[in-house]
Image (cartoon, coloured by chain):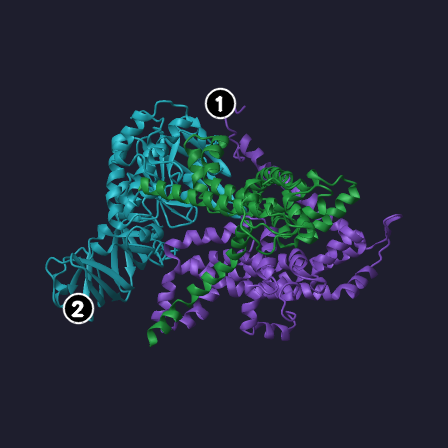
Amino acid sequence: MTAPVQAPAPTDGAPPPAGPRRRGRLVPYWLLLPGLLWLLVFFALPLVYQASTSVQTGSLEEGYEVTWHVATYGEALGDYWPQFLRSVLYAGAATAGCLLLGYPLAYLIAFRAGRWRNLILVLVIAPFFTSFLIRTLAWKTILADGGPVVGALNALHVLDVTNWLGATDGDRVLATPLAVVCGLTYNFLPFMVLPLYTSLERIDPRLHEAAGDLYARPSTTFRKVTFPLSMPGVVSGTLLTFIPAAGDYVNADLLGSTDTRMVGNVIQTQFLRILDYPTAAALSFLLMAAILLMVTFYIRKAGTEDLV
Amino acid sequence: MRTPFRWLRRNLVVIAGLLTLAYLLLPNVVVTVFSFNKPKGRFNYSWQEFSTEAWQDPCGVADMCGSLSLSLRIAFWATLGATVLGTMIAFALVRYRFRARGAVNALIFLPMAMPEVVMAASLLTLFLNMGAQLGFWTVLIAHIMFCLSFVVTAVKARVMSMDPRLEQAAQDLYAGPVQTFLRVTLPIAAPGIAAGALLAFALSFDDFIITNFNAGSTVTFPMFVWGSAQRGTPVQINVIGTAMFLVAVVLVLAGMLVGRRRNRKST
Amino acid sequence: MTDTSGDVRLTGISKRYGSFTAVHPLDLTVPQGSFYALLGASGCGKTTTLRMIAGLEEPSTGTVCLGEQDVTALPPYKRPVNTVFQSYALFPHLDIFENVAFGLRRRGIKSVKKQVGEMLDLVQLGEQARKKPHQLSGGQQQRVAVARALINHPKVLLLDEPLGALDLKLRRQMQLELKRIQTEVGITFVHVTHDQEEAMTMADTVAVMNGGRVEQQGAPAELYENPRTTFVANFLGTSNFIAAEVHSVSGDDVVLTAGDGKLVLPRNRCAAATGPGGKVLAGVRPEKISLAHADDAGTVPDGRNRLTGRIAAASFLGVSTQYVIDSPVCAAFEVYAQNVERDPRLTPGAEVVLHWNPAHTFGLDAGQDVEAGIEKVEEDA
């Protein structure tokens, strides 16, 4: 289509309107269009629908209507604040657990694994290939009443402490908050380890030597050099753990009891069983708002902008 | 007296890391062991006796293999859709300047920062409002939606680290736009696209929450497992879980070995 | 000599990015077969100019002609021009052979084996054909980049800081190598560099660019001996400047007063107005100056420009000694003296007379920044 080589160019000093290049200005928009349209219609628009549903009244038989019934939000919070609180507490505990467990592993892979590094990385990712539901069910066996794990915890008097904290109940771990937090921690641990590893791996090992050379003890080196440099990984790791954990209902359902229900469980039952759409939509909206608020605040505090 | 103590202190982080690794792998060990169990009753939670029955008849449970094949089909199409759309977005983001860049970035980022249950519930309201028939198509739509952002992130990282001069060099060496894309851009971006596609496949195949809301009466493999947790867990789901784990590990290790041999050959 | 098909002619070419002008309207002709260097500090517009010739950058105004052909509107893949990129831009997924064959294959040439083989032999990389770029050393990668461009027999070869990533020794070697190749193939080379030594050793013609404009162009020796601006005088080597006033013009000479002394310079080497009372910067290169101890002032022959001063610092460099001299008309005057017969009295603190042949003086307009073109931070050796 393009004219052969000797096309005369305009000589009046105006920028030459090279055909294909001029057309090139629309290229980014064509590239973006289908994907963004998909996200607008199936991600953003549903949020609008949900917001509108949350202020509707009516019943399943007679249909719903937007009546700006904002009171639904108050009622939902009044009825379900314990589940809300639990979601935040359990997700927070699981995030802390992931950080405590995940950091040594990430450190090990980044600095101490040597030629085993790739193998360990594979082992961290491989469990993903077994459905997480199957793996979560395995915790039912591991934490079973009277099993070796519970027995060991009992013998070490760990259960006395957790009982006192209200995280376990007598000789049982299963169907207690501890089991739910344990399941959440397990499920989202790789989401903590991988970003931590990525940011640790970027640290030049010579920095450790330099810190040692400048009279820092290993513990000081960690506090003053390694940990601050791994902050991007810590921030994205905690977000990737906390957000899905706060909305999760699988662990609470499979490993917990009616006393460990989280807000996700409520949304799920309201939506799929009780069919009280306004309440479910209001709860879902509240969860979204709470998480976005916390995330924004947290990112501001932690001062990392380069997450995207 | 001091030496063992010092050894312990120096290797504390290694020990702690390995314990975490054990914590991560323990459920897979349990899943594998219990795939050889012969439970009494409907649930496979406590050890009874060794048996290979389930391995000999993995599809012996009604509907399970059907749900597995449905999950694979959905994952395939969702991966294809999300990879194509996501790669296009990633290229636009890295290689072009355009208006409303911030808004586009936010729209990509938000699905990853949103609890699944919120996306699931809101998408269901949309489908209910539109009167859509819940099933294969609604699940596929949902999966492409939440996989898209992850593909964008993976491809973007790779394209960003690509030297733009490589494409200019191709153009300088008589490759037109199409040739440049096919011969230089695509091969170099391929690892990023592959990583994005792999991630999308894993996410789609294993998704439960969003699927559960939007599947209607269609049953994917994770939904089958969920249902069996209420009604009774057949040993066969452990067989499937173990097989997938082994296949994945073997494939990855084989890939690593091939890569290592190729490196050695060329140096 | 009449072949002009490899001429590069830029007419009124400029480049603006928003309100920033990277290259001001520029006219430039590179004759067929010459080795032409665009020299300047980073951000001076030299790379942008090169990229406009390659077609990688669209000019805001003006035209680019190769020989008689106007190529302004042609995309890069239709221009008979090839580029050796900064840091080479070798395709990491292709081996050396395929990198070199890339251009031939894109033009639909089927049997590339012989040509590629010959080209790899020319750059002494025949053994490495099946290696990937990352397995080669910097110098080898550089040669692949040259081979990949040259194999297409372009009318013009563009080189964008091709030696910037190499260490000093290798760079010297490659300078000679590139010069040899250019003489051998007779293709027009346009070479962009920030290294004045590199430009002067390799190029037939050097254009010094500053702030998006060509300050001066000419043969290396001409530029060095007769700079027209302080920027050129400082960017190419070192210059001493004396603020002076025109006293009178006698014949081919301009007589200046500086402090209480007189200086003479040839009229044709004066780039400033020569009306009496006009301000002039009199410049002289450090190696043109001779030093005599103040006690021997009588031995300085007549007819030479002379100044007095005191040695502030002396550093011994083996071949020569560099002196910094405080003079009433110029602080920190630099003098390089060959270590042939050293006068032991020339130590810091000694009073000296500086003298030089008036023909080595050049005069510049006094309205310029005396410090222009002095690199504040040394980038590398």
Residue B149 on image: x %, y %: 60, 47
Residue B125 left/right relative to B15: right
Classify mark 1: residues with Cα within 10 Å, few (<14), some (14-19) or many (20+). few
What type is the residue that disc 1 sits on?
Pro
Say which residue appears at 52% left-offset and 66% top-offset.
A100
For label 2, the SS is loop
Asked if residue B14 lies left or right of residue B26, the reply is: left
Residue A12 at x, y percent in the picture: 53, 32
Chain in purple (letter) = A
Numbered tag placed on residue C347 in the rendering = 2
Q: Is residue C199 visible?
A: no
Near-viewer residue (B249 or C332): B249
Residue A4 is marked as: 1
Toward the viewer: A179 or C223?
Answer: A179
Label 2 neighbour load within 10 Å: few <14, some 14-19, many 20+? some
Q: Chain of mark 1?
A: A
Residue at screen point 69% across, 44% down: A42
Image disc number at residue B257: none
Q: Residue furthest left?
A: C341
Q: Mark 2 is on which residue type? A: Thr
**Quick one: quadrant of the N terminus of chain A?**
top right
Q: Nearer the viewer, residue C126 or B12?
A: B12
Q: Colour of chain B?
A: green
Q: Nearer the viewer, residue A42 or A259?
A: A259
Q: Is residue C83 visible?
A: yes
Is C308 situated left or right of B132 in this image? left
Pointer 2 indicates a residue of which chain?
C
Picture coordinates of residue B136 (x, y %)? 69, 38
Mark 2–mark 1 Cα distance, whole angstroms, equals: 72 Å
Of the chain colours in the picture, the one used for chain C is cyan
Kindly state the secondary structure of the residue where label 1 is placed.
Answer: loop
